[in-house]
Image (tube, rainbow, N blue to C red):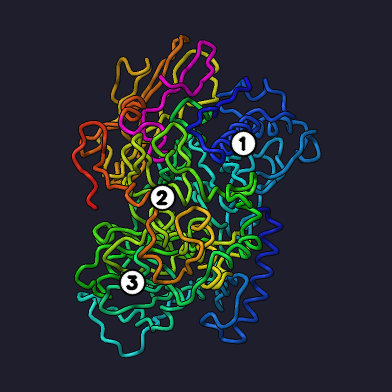
Amino acid sequence: MKKDRFASPRYGVAERRMAEALVELEAQALDPPTEETCACKEGMFPGLSRRSLLAGGASLGGAMIAAAAGRAQEAPPGAALEPVPEDPTRVQGQPVLSENGYGSRSQFESEVRWRYPTATAHTSWSMTPLASGHGIVTPSGLHFERHHAGIPTIDPRAHSLILHGMVEEPLRFTMDDLMRLPAVSRMHFIECSGNTLTEWEEPTLRTVQGTHGLTSTSEWTGVKLSTLLEMAGLRDGAAWILAEGADAAVMTRSVPVGKVMDDAILAYAQNGEALRPEQGYPLRLLLPGFEGNMQIKWLRRLEVSDTPYMTREETSKYTDLMPDGRARQFTFVMDAKSVITFPSGAMRLPRPGYYEITGLAWSGRGKVAKVEVSADGGETWEEAALEGPVLDKCHTRFRLPWVWNGEEAVLQSRVTDETGYVQPTLEELVAVRGTDSVYHLNAIQSWRVAGDGEVTNVHA
Amino acid sequence: MSMRNVSILAATGAAFALASHAQQADDAQVPRQAAELPQRLEGTGERAPETVPRSSAEEGAEIDPAAFRFGLGRRASGEEIAAVDIDVMPDGHGAPEGGGTFAEGEELYATHCVACHGADLQGVEGTGGVALIGGRGTLDTDAPVKTVESYWPHASTLFDYTQRAMPFNAPGSLTPDEVYAISAYILGRAGILDKGTEMDAATFAEIEMPNADGFYRATRPDTGPGEAPDAD
């Protein structure tokens, strides 16, 4: 099924190269050449999880799977390899703190982020495995990443934040200072505005990780940025704030003061512990509902101004080219979007029967009000149940029981947010934007379930 | 991470803990490689809680939380600000002293840029280096080519980005004169800046980029019955 997917002249050389490589890589991950392909097609989840299960099952004959099994035995990332006893009720388990005081996941779980095959691994991105996610929280180690110059290693004791420009008093804060200030904890999604960018013209990637994996949700803890601005005092005319990171890209974006005063957070913690290095350790900007690129990681400087700074990331990138050749600038808010994560692309339903359709919905403008699900490509819709709590600018889990009768079906989800905005079809979106805007594709996603249970990405 | 690696890290951390405690390194005077494990408390052997964060404010600072005076943080000095205040705005605000010419830039480009961006400034496949020039008149076609020449609305952005993030193998290593010269070279090759013009802080306001008027702020959302347009 090799096909020139990106032949359209609308793709630039670099985009085509990256997209081709991405498709190739995804195909390899789904069908590893060393593995008999039938093995992973039996279950509903393709790839690595299935292989782990097989490995576990192969160990019945012996106490030590590493010795007993013919397959390569390595702990998946984030796990430690322990012997698997024949009967766990007849031997003592692992001693307390055998993992040195910081836990690990089961050796039988192996979900991993997956890197987009850009030319270098330093300016690249990785995607969250949404298909295997549960609830609304993304494990910190599976949160998507986008870096422009690698992940810096920063000692928080050597890090400071400087706030200057159109303020009454320029201020300097150590991490210690920031951690003593009044704090808030909020659950929010972050989505890259490039999420789903491969899907404008035709169904391209096969899994929900590939099509939608640049969105994740965490609980973020830190200081409201408005607190620091109150301390410094904004001068008349202050309208924009430049946020700057301490990575090798010295990443910069201009943020409207109104947004900052509303709900921006300087976050030092994620899901109950310090930020992960790849999420901006020791300090990142959080702008709930705005595109991910603006939420500057490794934050070192904030400068207040009356005009935007017109940095590379808000002119040459993260602007949306329209059919008339002009480009939209400062398209910050992530419009409401939803996607079914189960069943989703490259899964195979083993047989007709009961399945719970589930997925995620979110909006950069507030709360999710309603999610509807269609099993017939949008002809008829049924309202899904929303799993509480439904939070502002946060992933919301939806569920709908479904009995698959074995006939072809096309599954879709459609979110309505609390402003009344309804997630558009791809056709509606393309009618306004054309297909060259790259960013902000929030259209309804379709998964086709074939008669044999194979689930594929389709445009319906 | 495997247990083995965790153990090694822990051991490393313990070694550094000894070193840093001996020197009472509360601030960043001694570069650390890792955090030490929490100390054991006498008697019970419990792990000690984290050290209470210290304020960098001078002692005796007025404290009134209701008025956002917490006695935390301090005034940033002009020197501290200057050390990180590197941005250059469209009107040239923030541009450093110095200057450079097309001819100087040609030589510097061949040293620092050509490997990824190519002698033709079209980018070298496999390096991630993008095309810098060309593409004028393509933005409203089915094959838009976005380059500094065809797409970027401000010359300041070229200087600012080159200064902060380029070259990729040695970011931040170019002097202001070198960045001016490389900018002059790229803009010269793009037919935007006269090759005889020396580029300096005053040049930014004068340069007219071909796509300067190509950007606008849209009302969103742009589909369906939404009600809240962007507030900026």
Q: Provide the residue span drawn in magenta.
A: A432-460
Disc 1 to disc 3: CB gap under 8 Å: no
Query: From mark 2 to mark 1, how far is it between C-alphas?
Result: 24 Å
Q: Which mark is residue A181?
A: 3
Q: CA distance from mark 1 to mark 3?
A: 46 Å
**Residue B102 falls in image quadrant:** bottom right
C-alpha separation, residue under disc 2 versus residue under disc 3:
25 Å
Residue occupying the point 47% across, 61% down: B194
The chain to which mark 3 is attached is: A
Provide the secondary structure element on which disc 1 rests: helix
Amino acid type at circle 2 is Gly
Q: For residue A226, which quarter of the picture?
A: bottom left
Q: Dot 2 corresponds to which residue?
A: A292
**Tags 1 and 3 both on a single chain:** yes
Q: Nearer the viewer, mark 2 or mark 3?
A: 2
Query: Could you say where residue B116 lies in the image, as x and y percent from the top left?
Result: 63, 53
Dominant SS of magenta comes to: loop
In this picture, residue B147 sits left or right of residue A241 = right
Q: Which quadrant is the N terminus of chain A positioned in?
A: top right
Q: Which label's residue is closer to the chain start, 2 or 3?
A: 3
| Image side of residue A390 versus residue B156, left or right | left
The answer to whether residue A262 is above or below residue A20 is: below
